Amino acid sequence: MAVVGAGIVGLAVAREVMARRPGCELIVIDKQPTVGEYQTGHNSGVIHAGVYYSPGSLKARLCVQGAALMYEYCEANAVPYQRCGKLIVAIKQDELGRLADLEARGHANGVPGLRRVSGAEIAEIEPECRGLAALHSPATGIVDFQAVARAIERELRGQGVTFELGREVTSVRREPNATVLTHADGEWRARSVIACAGLWSDRLAVCAGAPADPRVVPFRGAYLRLPPTAPELVRGLVYPVPDPALPFLGVHVTRHVSGHVLLGPTALLALARDGHSGRSRQALHDAGQTLAWPGTWRMGRRFWRTGIDEITMAINRRAFVERCAQYVPAVRSATIDEQALHGVRAQAVGRDGRLTDDFVISHTPGVTHVRNAPSPAATSSFALAREIVDRFDAESAAAE
C-alpha cells in the first residue's frame, strides 16, 4: 500500500493505516527531501477550535475532534504546544451580527469554552487589543505542525514504514490488481493508494481518471514577523471577524510557539504551486494551468474588490500593519523583521468559480484522493485521517 504526500495529513493517514493494519507493508512518498515541507511547514501554527465552520460539515466535525486529538498527541510525544486562546474581535457595529452568527456556529459545533465578551473584558484578556465585543475561544492553541510531522515520521519509521522522500510521483495508472505510480527513476506498484498530495492533488486525481473539477488554485500568503524580543503585544491570538463569503480568516495577530508574533496572512493568487520561497521553476506552467481554468476568471469577477485589497497589503507594508492595528493599535510602533514569511495554500475552485468550502475526498479505481484539505486540515489531521481511511476501507470493500 502507498500514501502519496508526507505533509501532516498524509502522515496522519499512514499512521491510521498502521493502527488498523499492524505489520502492513506501507510506503510514504513525497517530492520533498523532508516531511512537512509545503503547507504543513508554512502556516501560522494555529490549532483551531472549530468556531468558523458550517454545522454538519466535515470541517466542523473533524476540527473539534482533531483539535482534541492534536493536543493529546503533542502531550504524549513531548511536542511543545500552548493552549493560549483566541479572541475574534468586532471593531464595527456591522460586525456584531456576524459575531453572533459565529457564536451560534461555535456552540452548534461543540467548541469548548466559547463565550462572548464585552469591550472591557477584551482588555482583560488581551491588554493591547481594542474592540466593541469579541468571542473568546480558550481551546484554541499553537504548535509547530512540522514538529508534529517529524514526530509522526519517527513513529512510522519505528513501525517499519518505508519512506521515499525526494521522489515526485509524475503519473498514476491502474492495472489489474495494482496501482502504478511513476517517478523519474522508475515506478512503484501498490495494491492501493491514498493520495494526500496537497497542491498537486488535482493533477494526480485527473491522471488517475477523476474529473478536472474542482481545480487547485494556489493562494500565496505573506506574514510579517516581530522578533521574540519585542514587547508582548498579544498573549495569544487575535483575529478579526471574517468575511463569510470567503474561506480566509483575514489578517490576524498571532503568537507562534517560537516566541515570534506574526501579522497576516495576506491571500493573493499565486503564480506557482511551490512558490512559498518566492522562486519556482514551474511558475509558467502553474500559472498557465490556473489561468486556463474557467473557475479562476469567474472567481476573479466575483472577488475583484477583495483582490485589489490584498494586492494593496502585499505591496504596502504600512497598509498591512494598519489593518492589524485596527484591533491591536500597538503594532503601529512595533519593530518588524525586514523579511516576510510566505506560504502557499491549496484551495479547490469549481468550474463555476465557487471556492470549495469543505474537505473533499473522492475515489478512482485503486486510489482514494484528498481533493481539498485547506485550513483547518492541520488541526483536523488525526480526525481527518480516520475519515479518509474509513472511506478508503468502504470503497475497497465495495470493489471486492
Image (spheres, rainbow, N blue to C red):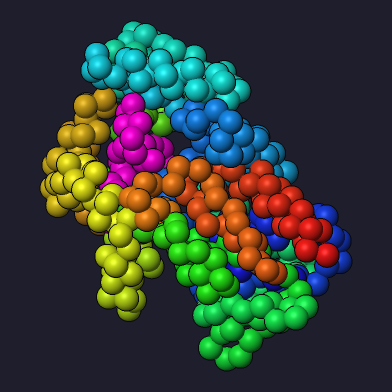
Q: Is residue 374 rendered to the left or right of residue 29?
A: left
* Residue lying at 40% horizontally and 15% vertically, measured from the top left: 100
* Residue lying at 57% horizontally and 21% vertically, measured from the top left: 108
- Quadrant position of the C terminus in the picture: bottom right
Q: Nearer the viewer, residue 227 or 320?
A: 320
Q: Which residues are magenta?
A: 240-269
* Residue lying at 63% horizontally and 65% vertically, measured from the top left: 364
The location of residue 213, given as percent across then percent down, is 45, 59
The location of residue 345, given as percent across then percent down, is 40, 54
| Image position of 309 with respect to 347: above or below | above
Q: Is residue 316 rendered to the left or right of residue 1?
A: left
| Image position of 396 with respect to 303: above or below | below
Q: Nearer the viewer, residue 375 or 130?
A: 375
Question: Looking at the magenta stretch, what is its main secondary structure?
Answer: loop
The location of residue 10, given as percent across then percent down, is 62, 60
* Residue lying at 48% horizontally and 40% vertically, measured from the top left: 46
Residue 162 visible in the snapshot? no
| Image position of 248 with respect to 211: above or below | above
- Quadrant position of the N terminus in the picture: bottom right
Q: Nearer the viewer, residue 162 or 50?
A: 50
The location of residue 349, given as percent across then percent down, is 39, 53
Q: Is residue 300 rendered to the left or right of residue 41?
A: left
Q: Is residue 263 magenta?
A: yes
The quarter of the picture where residue 199 lies is: bottom left
Q: Is residue 355 rendered to the left or right of residue 266?
A: right
